[in-house]
Image: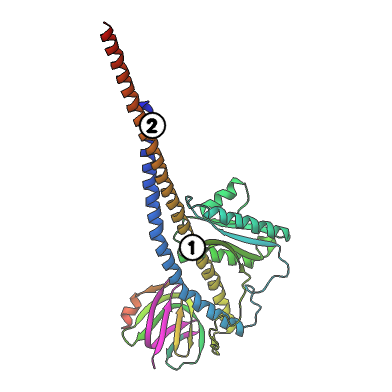
Amino acid sequence: MPLQVELVAADRSVWSGEATLVRARTVDGEIGIMAGHEPLLAVLAEGEVSVTGTGGGTTVHVDGGFFSVDSDTVTIVAETVREGTGRAAEDR
Amino acid sequence: MAGQLRAYRRQIRSVQATKKITRAMELIAASRIIKAQANVRASTPYARALTRAVSAAASNASLDHPLITEKPQVRRAAVLLLSSDRGLAGAYSSSVLREGERLTAALRAEGKEVSPYLVGRKAASFYRFRRRDVTAEWAGFTDSPRYEHAKEIGERLVADFGREAAEGGVDEIHVVYTHFVSMVTQEPRVIRLLPLEVVEGAGEQDGELMPLYSFEPSPEAVLDALLPQYVNSRVYNCLLQAAASELAARQRAMKSATDNADELIKSLTRLANNARQADITQEITEIVGGADALSSAGSRA
């Protein structure tokens, strides 16, 4: 069962859909979330969040914020979200 | 007599020009309300996620975070007033200011000092005219606030809240804004922004239980990071509500101005017609009178 991902900025909803993997950088280090992860509430560090969607994903740059995981629903919340970064292009 | 007719015509033209302006302002406000309402809707997912996370973290962390704890002695209270930058919005700004005055008086009666934080030029000029001290003011974005504005205000408020009253800090923060109920109803409201009132389990809906989150790095650190964001989001929501209310108030005010211009034009046109008819009647009377005088003079001769 895929993850339901919602990526929201303060003034808009940036991306939402199904995904197999969410990678993010928390204040403790990088973390990857796949389906069946335990409920988690983590503080994000400034950096990239990448979502590997079932039909195409997205990579964005956030300036902090947090994300929550519970029963295969991932909500990533950041005050400002910048889409499409140079780093993302290199990664692929 | 012809001079009177000209005066009426000039008045009609000037009212027509004013009517065009108020009509344009009405249409602009009407189209921007839709956008303002869309902004309110667009910010809801963020506010909902944040509220949920805050109540999850608060129920796991010990509740002695400075932003939640009531201070034992409140010496100074901050009042954040959200008014508009421009007038021509009916009673919008004045009703916010009146509510602010009422709150200020109530706080003073409780023996608290009040430091005003103002948003919008109308509030700033209200305070300046009365030569009152203002702690901080922001202006220039009241009809289309962006998140950065809310962040700036929120950070300033949290910073002042963190300081001791003796150093110019405040012990509680109230916000006066106009709540957008519908297109026809907007009401001024007062909310207490800080210390926050975190209702545990506010994120639970329909008996759905809060999952047992694990926190990274720790519940306290998560709460620490979330609360300032939560404050910013509350401020943002108030700004958006106020913007939608301002536009609705302006639209209504401009609509009644346009209607009034129509009425004025109608009654002025009647008066002008009257004056024209009076002119014609007088001319006819003069001509008839003149012809009568001539013919009677001719028959006598």
In front here: B298 or B124? B298
Per the image, label 2 sits on a secondary structure element best described as helix
Q: Callout 1: 10 Å neighbours few (<14), some, many (20+)?
A: some
> Which chain does the residue under circle 2 lie in?
B
In the image, is B2 to the left or to the right of B210?
left
Q: Label 2 vs label 1: CA separation?
A: 50 Å
Tag 2 residue: B7
Report the magenta residues as a range.
A1-29
In front here: B297 or B79? B297
Q: Residue at coordinates 42% horizontally, 52% vertically from top-left?
A: B255
Name the kind of residue labelled 1 in the image. Answer: His
Q: Callout 2: 10 Å neighbours few (<14), some, many (20+)?
A: few
Q: Quadrant of the N terminus of chain A?
A: bottom left
> Which chain does the residue under circle 1 lie in?
B
In front here: A74 or B298? B298
Q: Answer with mark 2 or mark 1, whichever residue precedes in sequence.
A: 2
Q: Is residue B212 visible?
A: yes
In front here: A25 or B266? B266
Determine the residue located farthest toward the front in the rendered image: B299
Tag 1 residue: B149
Is residue B18 positioned above or below B139 on the image?
Answer: above
The percent position of residue A28, horizontal first and vertical second, equals 50, 84
The percent position of residue B156, horizontal first and vertical second, equals 56, 63
Q: Residue at coordinates 61% horizontally, 76% vertically from top-left?
A: B198
Q: Quadrant of the C terminus of chain A?
A: bottom left
The percent position of residue B251, horizontal first and vertical second, equals 43, 55
